[in-house]
Amino acid sequence: MNNFPDFPDEKFRFVKRDETIQDAVFQTKQVGYFRDAMRRFKKNKSSVAAAVIILLLILFAILTPIFATYNMGFTDSYYTFTRPKCTLLSGLGIWDGCSNRTVNQQTYDYYEAAGAVISVKDVYEVTDGGRKNTYYDTKVDDYLAVGYEYINLTPSEYEAAAAYEKETGKQLFYPMVNLSEVQQDANTVDANYWFEHNARGVAQRDADGELVPIYKTDENSEDGLAYYSLKMNGNQYQVRVYYYDWFTYKNGQAPAFLFGTDYMGHDILTRLASGARFSLMLSVIVSAINFIIGTIYGAIEGYYGGKLDLVMERIADVLYSIPYMVLFSLLQLRWGKEIGVVGALLLAFVLTGWIGVASTVRSQFYRFKGQEYVLAARTLGAKDGRLIARHILPNALGTIVTSCVLMVPGVIFTESSLSYLGVLNLDSSTLTSVGTMLSNAQSALSTYPHAIFFPALFISLMMISFNLFGNGLRDALNPTLRGADE
């Protein structure tokens, strides 16, 4: 019985009977390994954002010291822990270098005499032990709070400043205070006490509520006021200046620190950028050295295996068991004077930092050395060096590069931890690090949080961004590890 339908012959025809069938030519460009990896990487939005942040942080570290207003060695003892100020935003009442303070009558009079009171939000009285104390909720400009200061000048410096006054019409020298009328200790007298006050420092105002000056008079001067006094047999002048204007005269611009200043009066912006540059350079150098050593060591272990692998692994285990802090301390004590603190730090990182890379390379070589393409290459006469460099290593490169990228934030974090704990000290006029800045600012966390906020923000962004970037790079270079923890 025929179960198939009966089709007529005209329904059938030959396909390409007179044509030669050939493979079709690809119409698209070839996609290499790294281009394909880049396509996968771009699909990971968090990793792309992390890469952009890392690039911005690197540009910040490189360009800021070049274009910054102040250099690494800049310091001003009058402007310590000064709050951040941006001249572009200060007019809007934000980022203006001001602080809100609740002060008593004595402090309020002091700030008023210094010209630092911007506004008064509230005034109230508190009775304590039968005595009424007046308090002010004020907004104070940190840059003006320095007020007046006594400064000693050489004759040439004094003449240059006096000539500046005449040329620009801007006042630099102010009347000297009659110290005999100052109720404070004459040895610690403050140039801002130029007004009548009692023993507690509270101002004795006139009928209009204005401060009453107690300037030193000079009958020989044209206006009856002494603007300077001679000291050391006429070899030096002591003058009283308004420090905000004096700073402008000496530095060519008004004081304004974008990130504020630290405990030494350093510009945090410049110090942070320079410290970030040092930390990044250190981490990149350490990562490169550890990458080379770890790759060679791990490749030998993984490729040859056997007793050689066993001996080399035990050596790595011994080195890995040494606590890093102990290792650095011993190196610093032994060779600190010969190679310096930075040299001891670099040596400590290199002595044990390659072990993680070696372990990764070793595991990748064990994974790939038995593959068919490696056996085929060996059958065709490829030497061990060619098998390692041309066949196994390129296939393990994705995992190895990822581990080296993640080593960068690890080095930065370790250096910062050592500096924060005081084991490592990189604080000088020409060198600092992010960890050193964090260590120096920890005592002022509650009173001047800006000193620790910006270094902490930088290292936080760096750590998070490098980890996200490393994870995205891992997924792009080795898709089989996508979503793995390591």
Image (cartoon, helix red, strand yellow):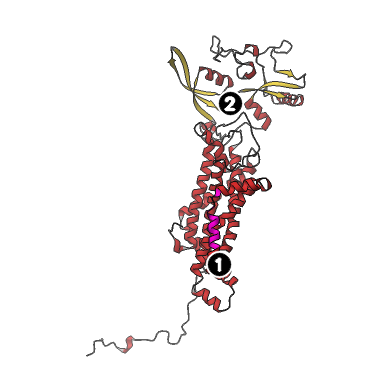
Q: Nearer the viewer, residue 217 or 261?
A: 261
Furthest toward the bottom, the residue is 1
Circle number at residue 308: 1
Q: What secondary structure is the stretch in magenta mostly built from?
A: helix
Magenta-drawn segment: 312-324
Q: Amino acid at mark 2?
A: Leu
The residue located at (72%, 10%) in the rendering is 219
**Relative depth, front residue between 49 and 466:** 466
Q: Amino acid at mark 1?
A: Leu
**Within 10 angstroms of label 2, few (less than 14), some, or many (20 or more) residues?**
many
Residue position marked by numbered label 2 in the rendering: 144
Quarter holding the N terminus is bottom left
Q: Quadrant of residue 273?
A: top right
Q: What separation in Å lies between label 1 and label 2 (alpha carbons)?
A: 71 Å
The residue depicted at 54 percent of the width and 68 percent of the height is 307
From the viewer's perspective, is 172 left or right of 479?
right
In this view of the protein, which residue sits in the foreground, 279 or 149?
Answer: 279
Say which of 325 and 79 sits in front: 325
Sequence-first tag of 1 and 2: 2
- Is the residue 6 above or below the residue 144 in the image? below
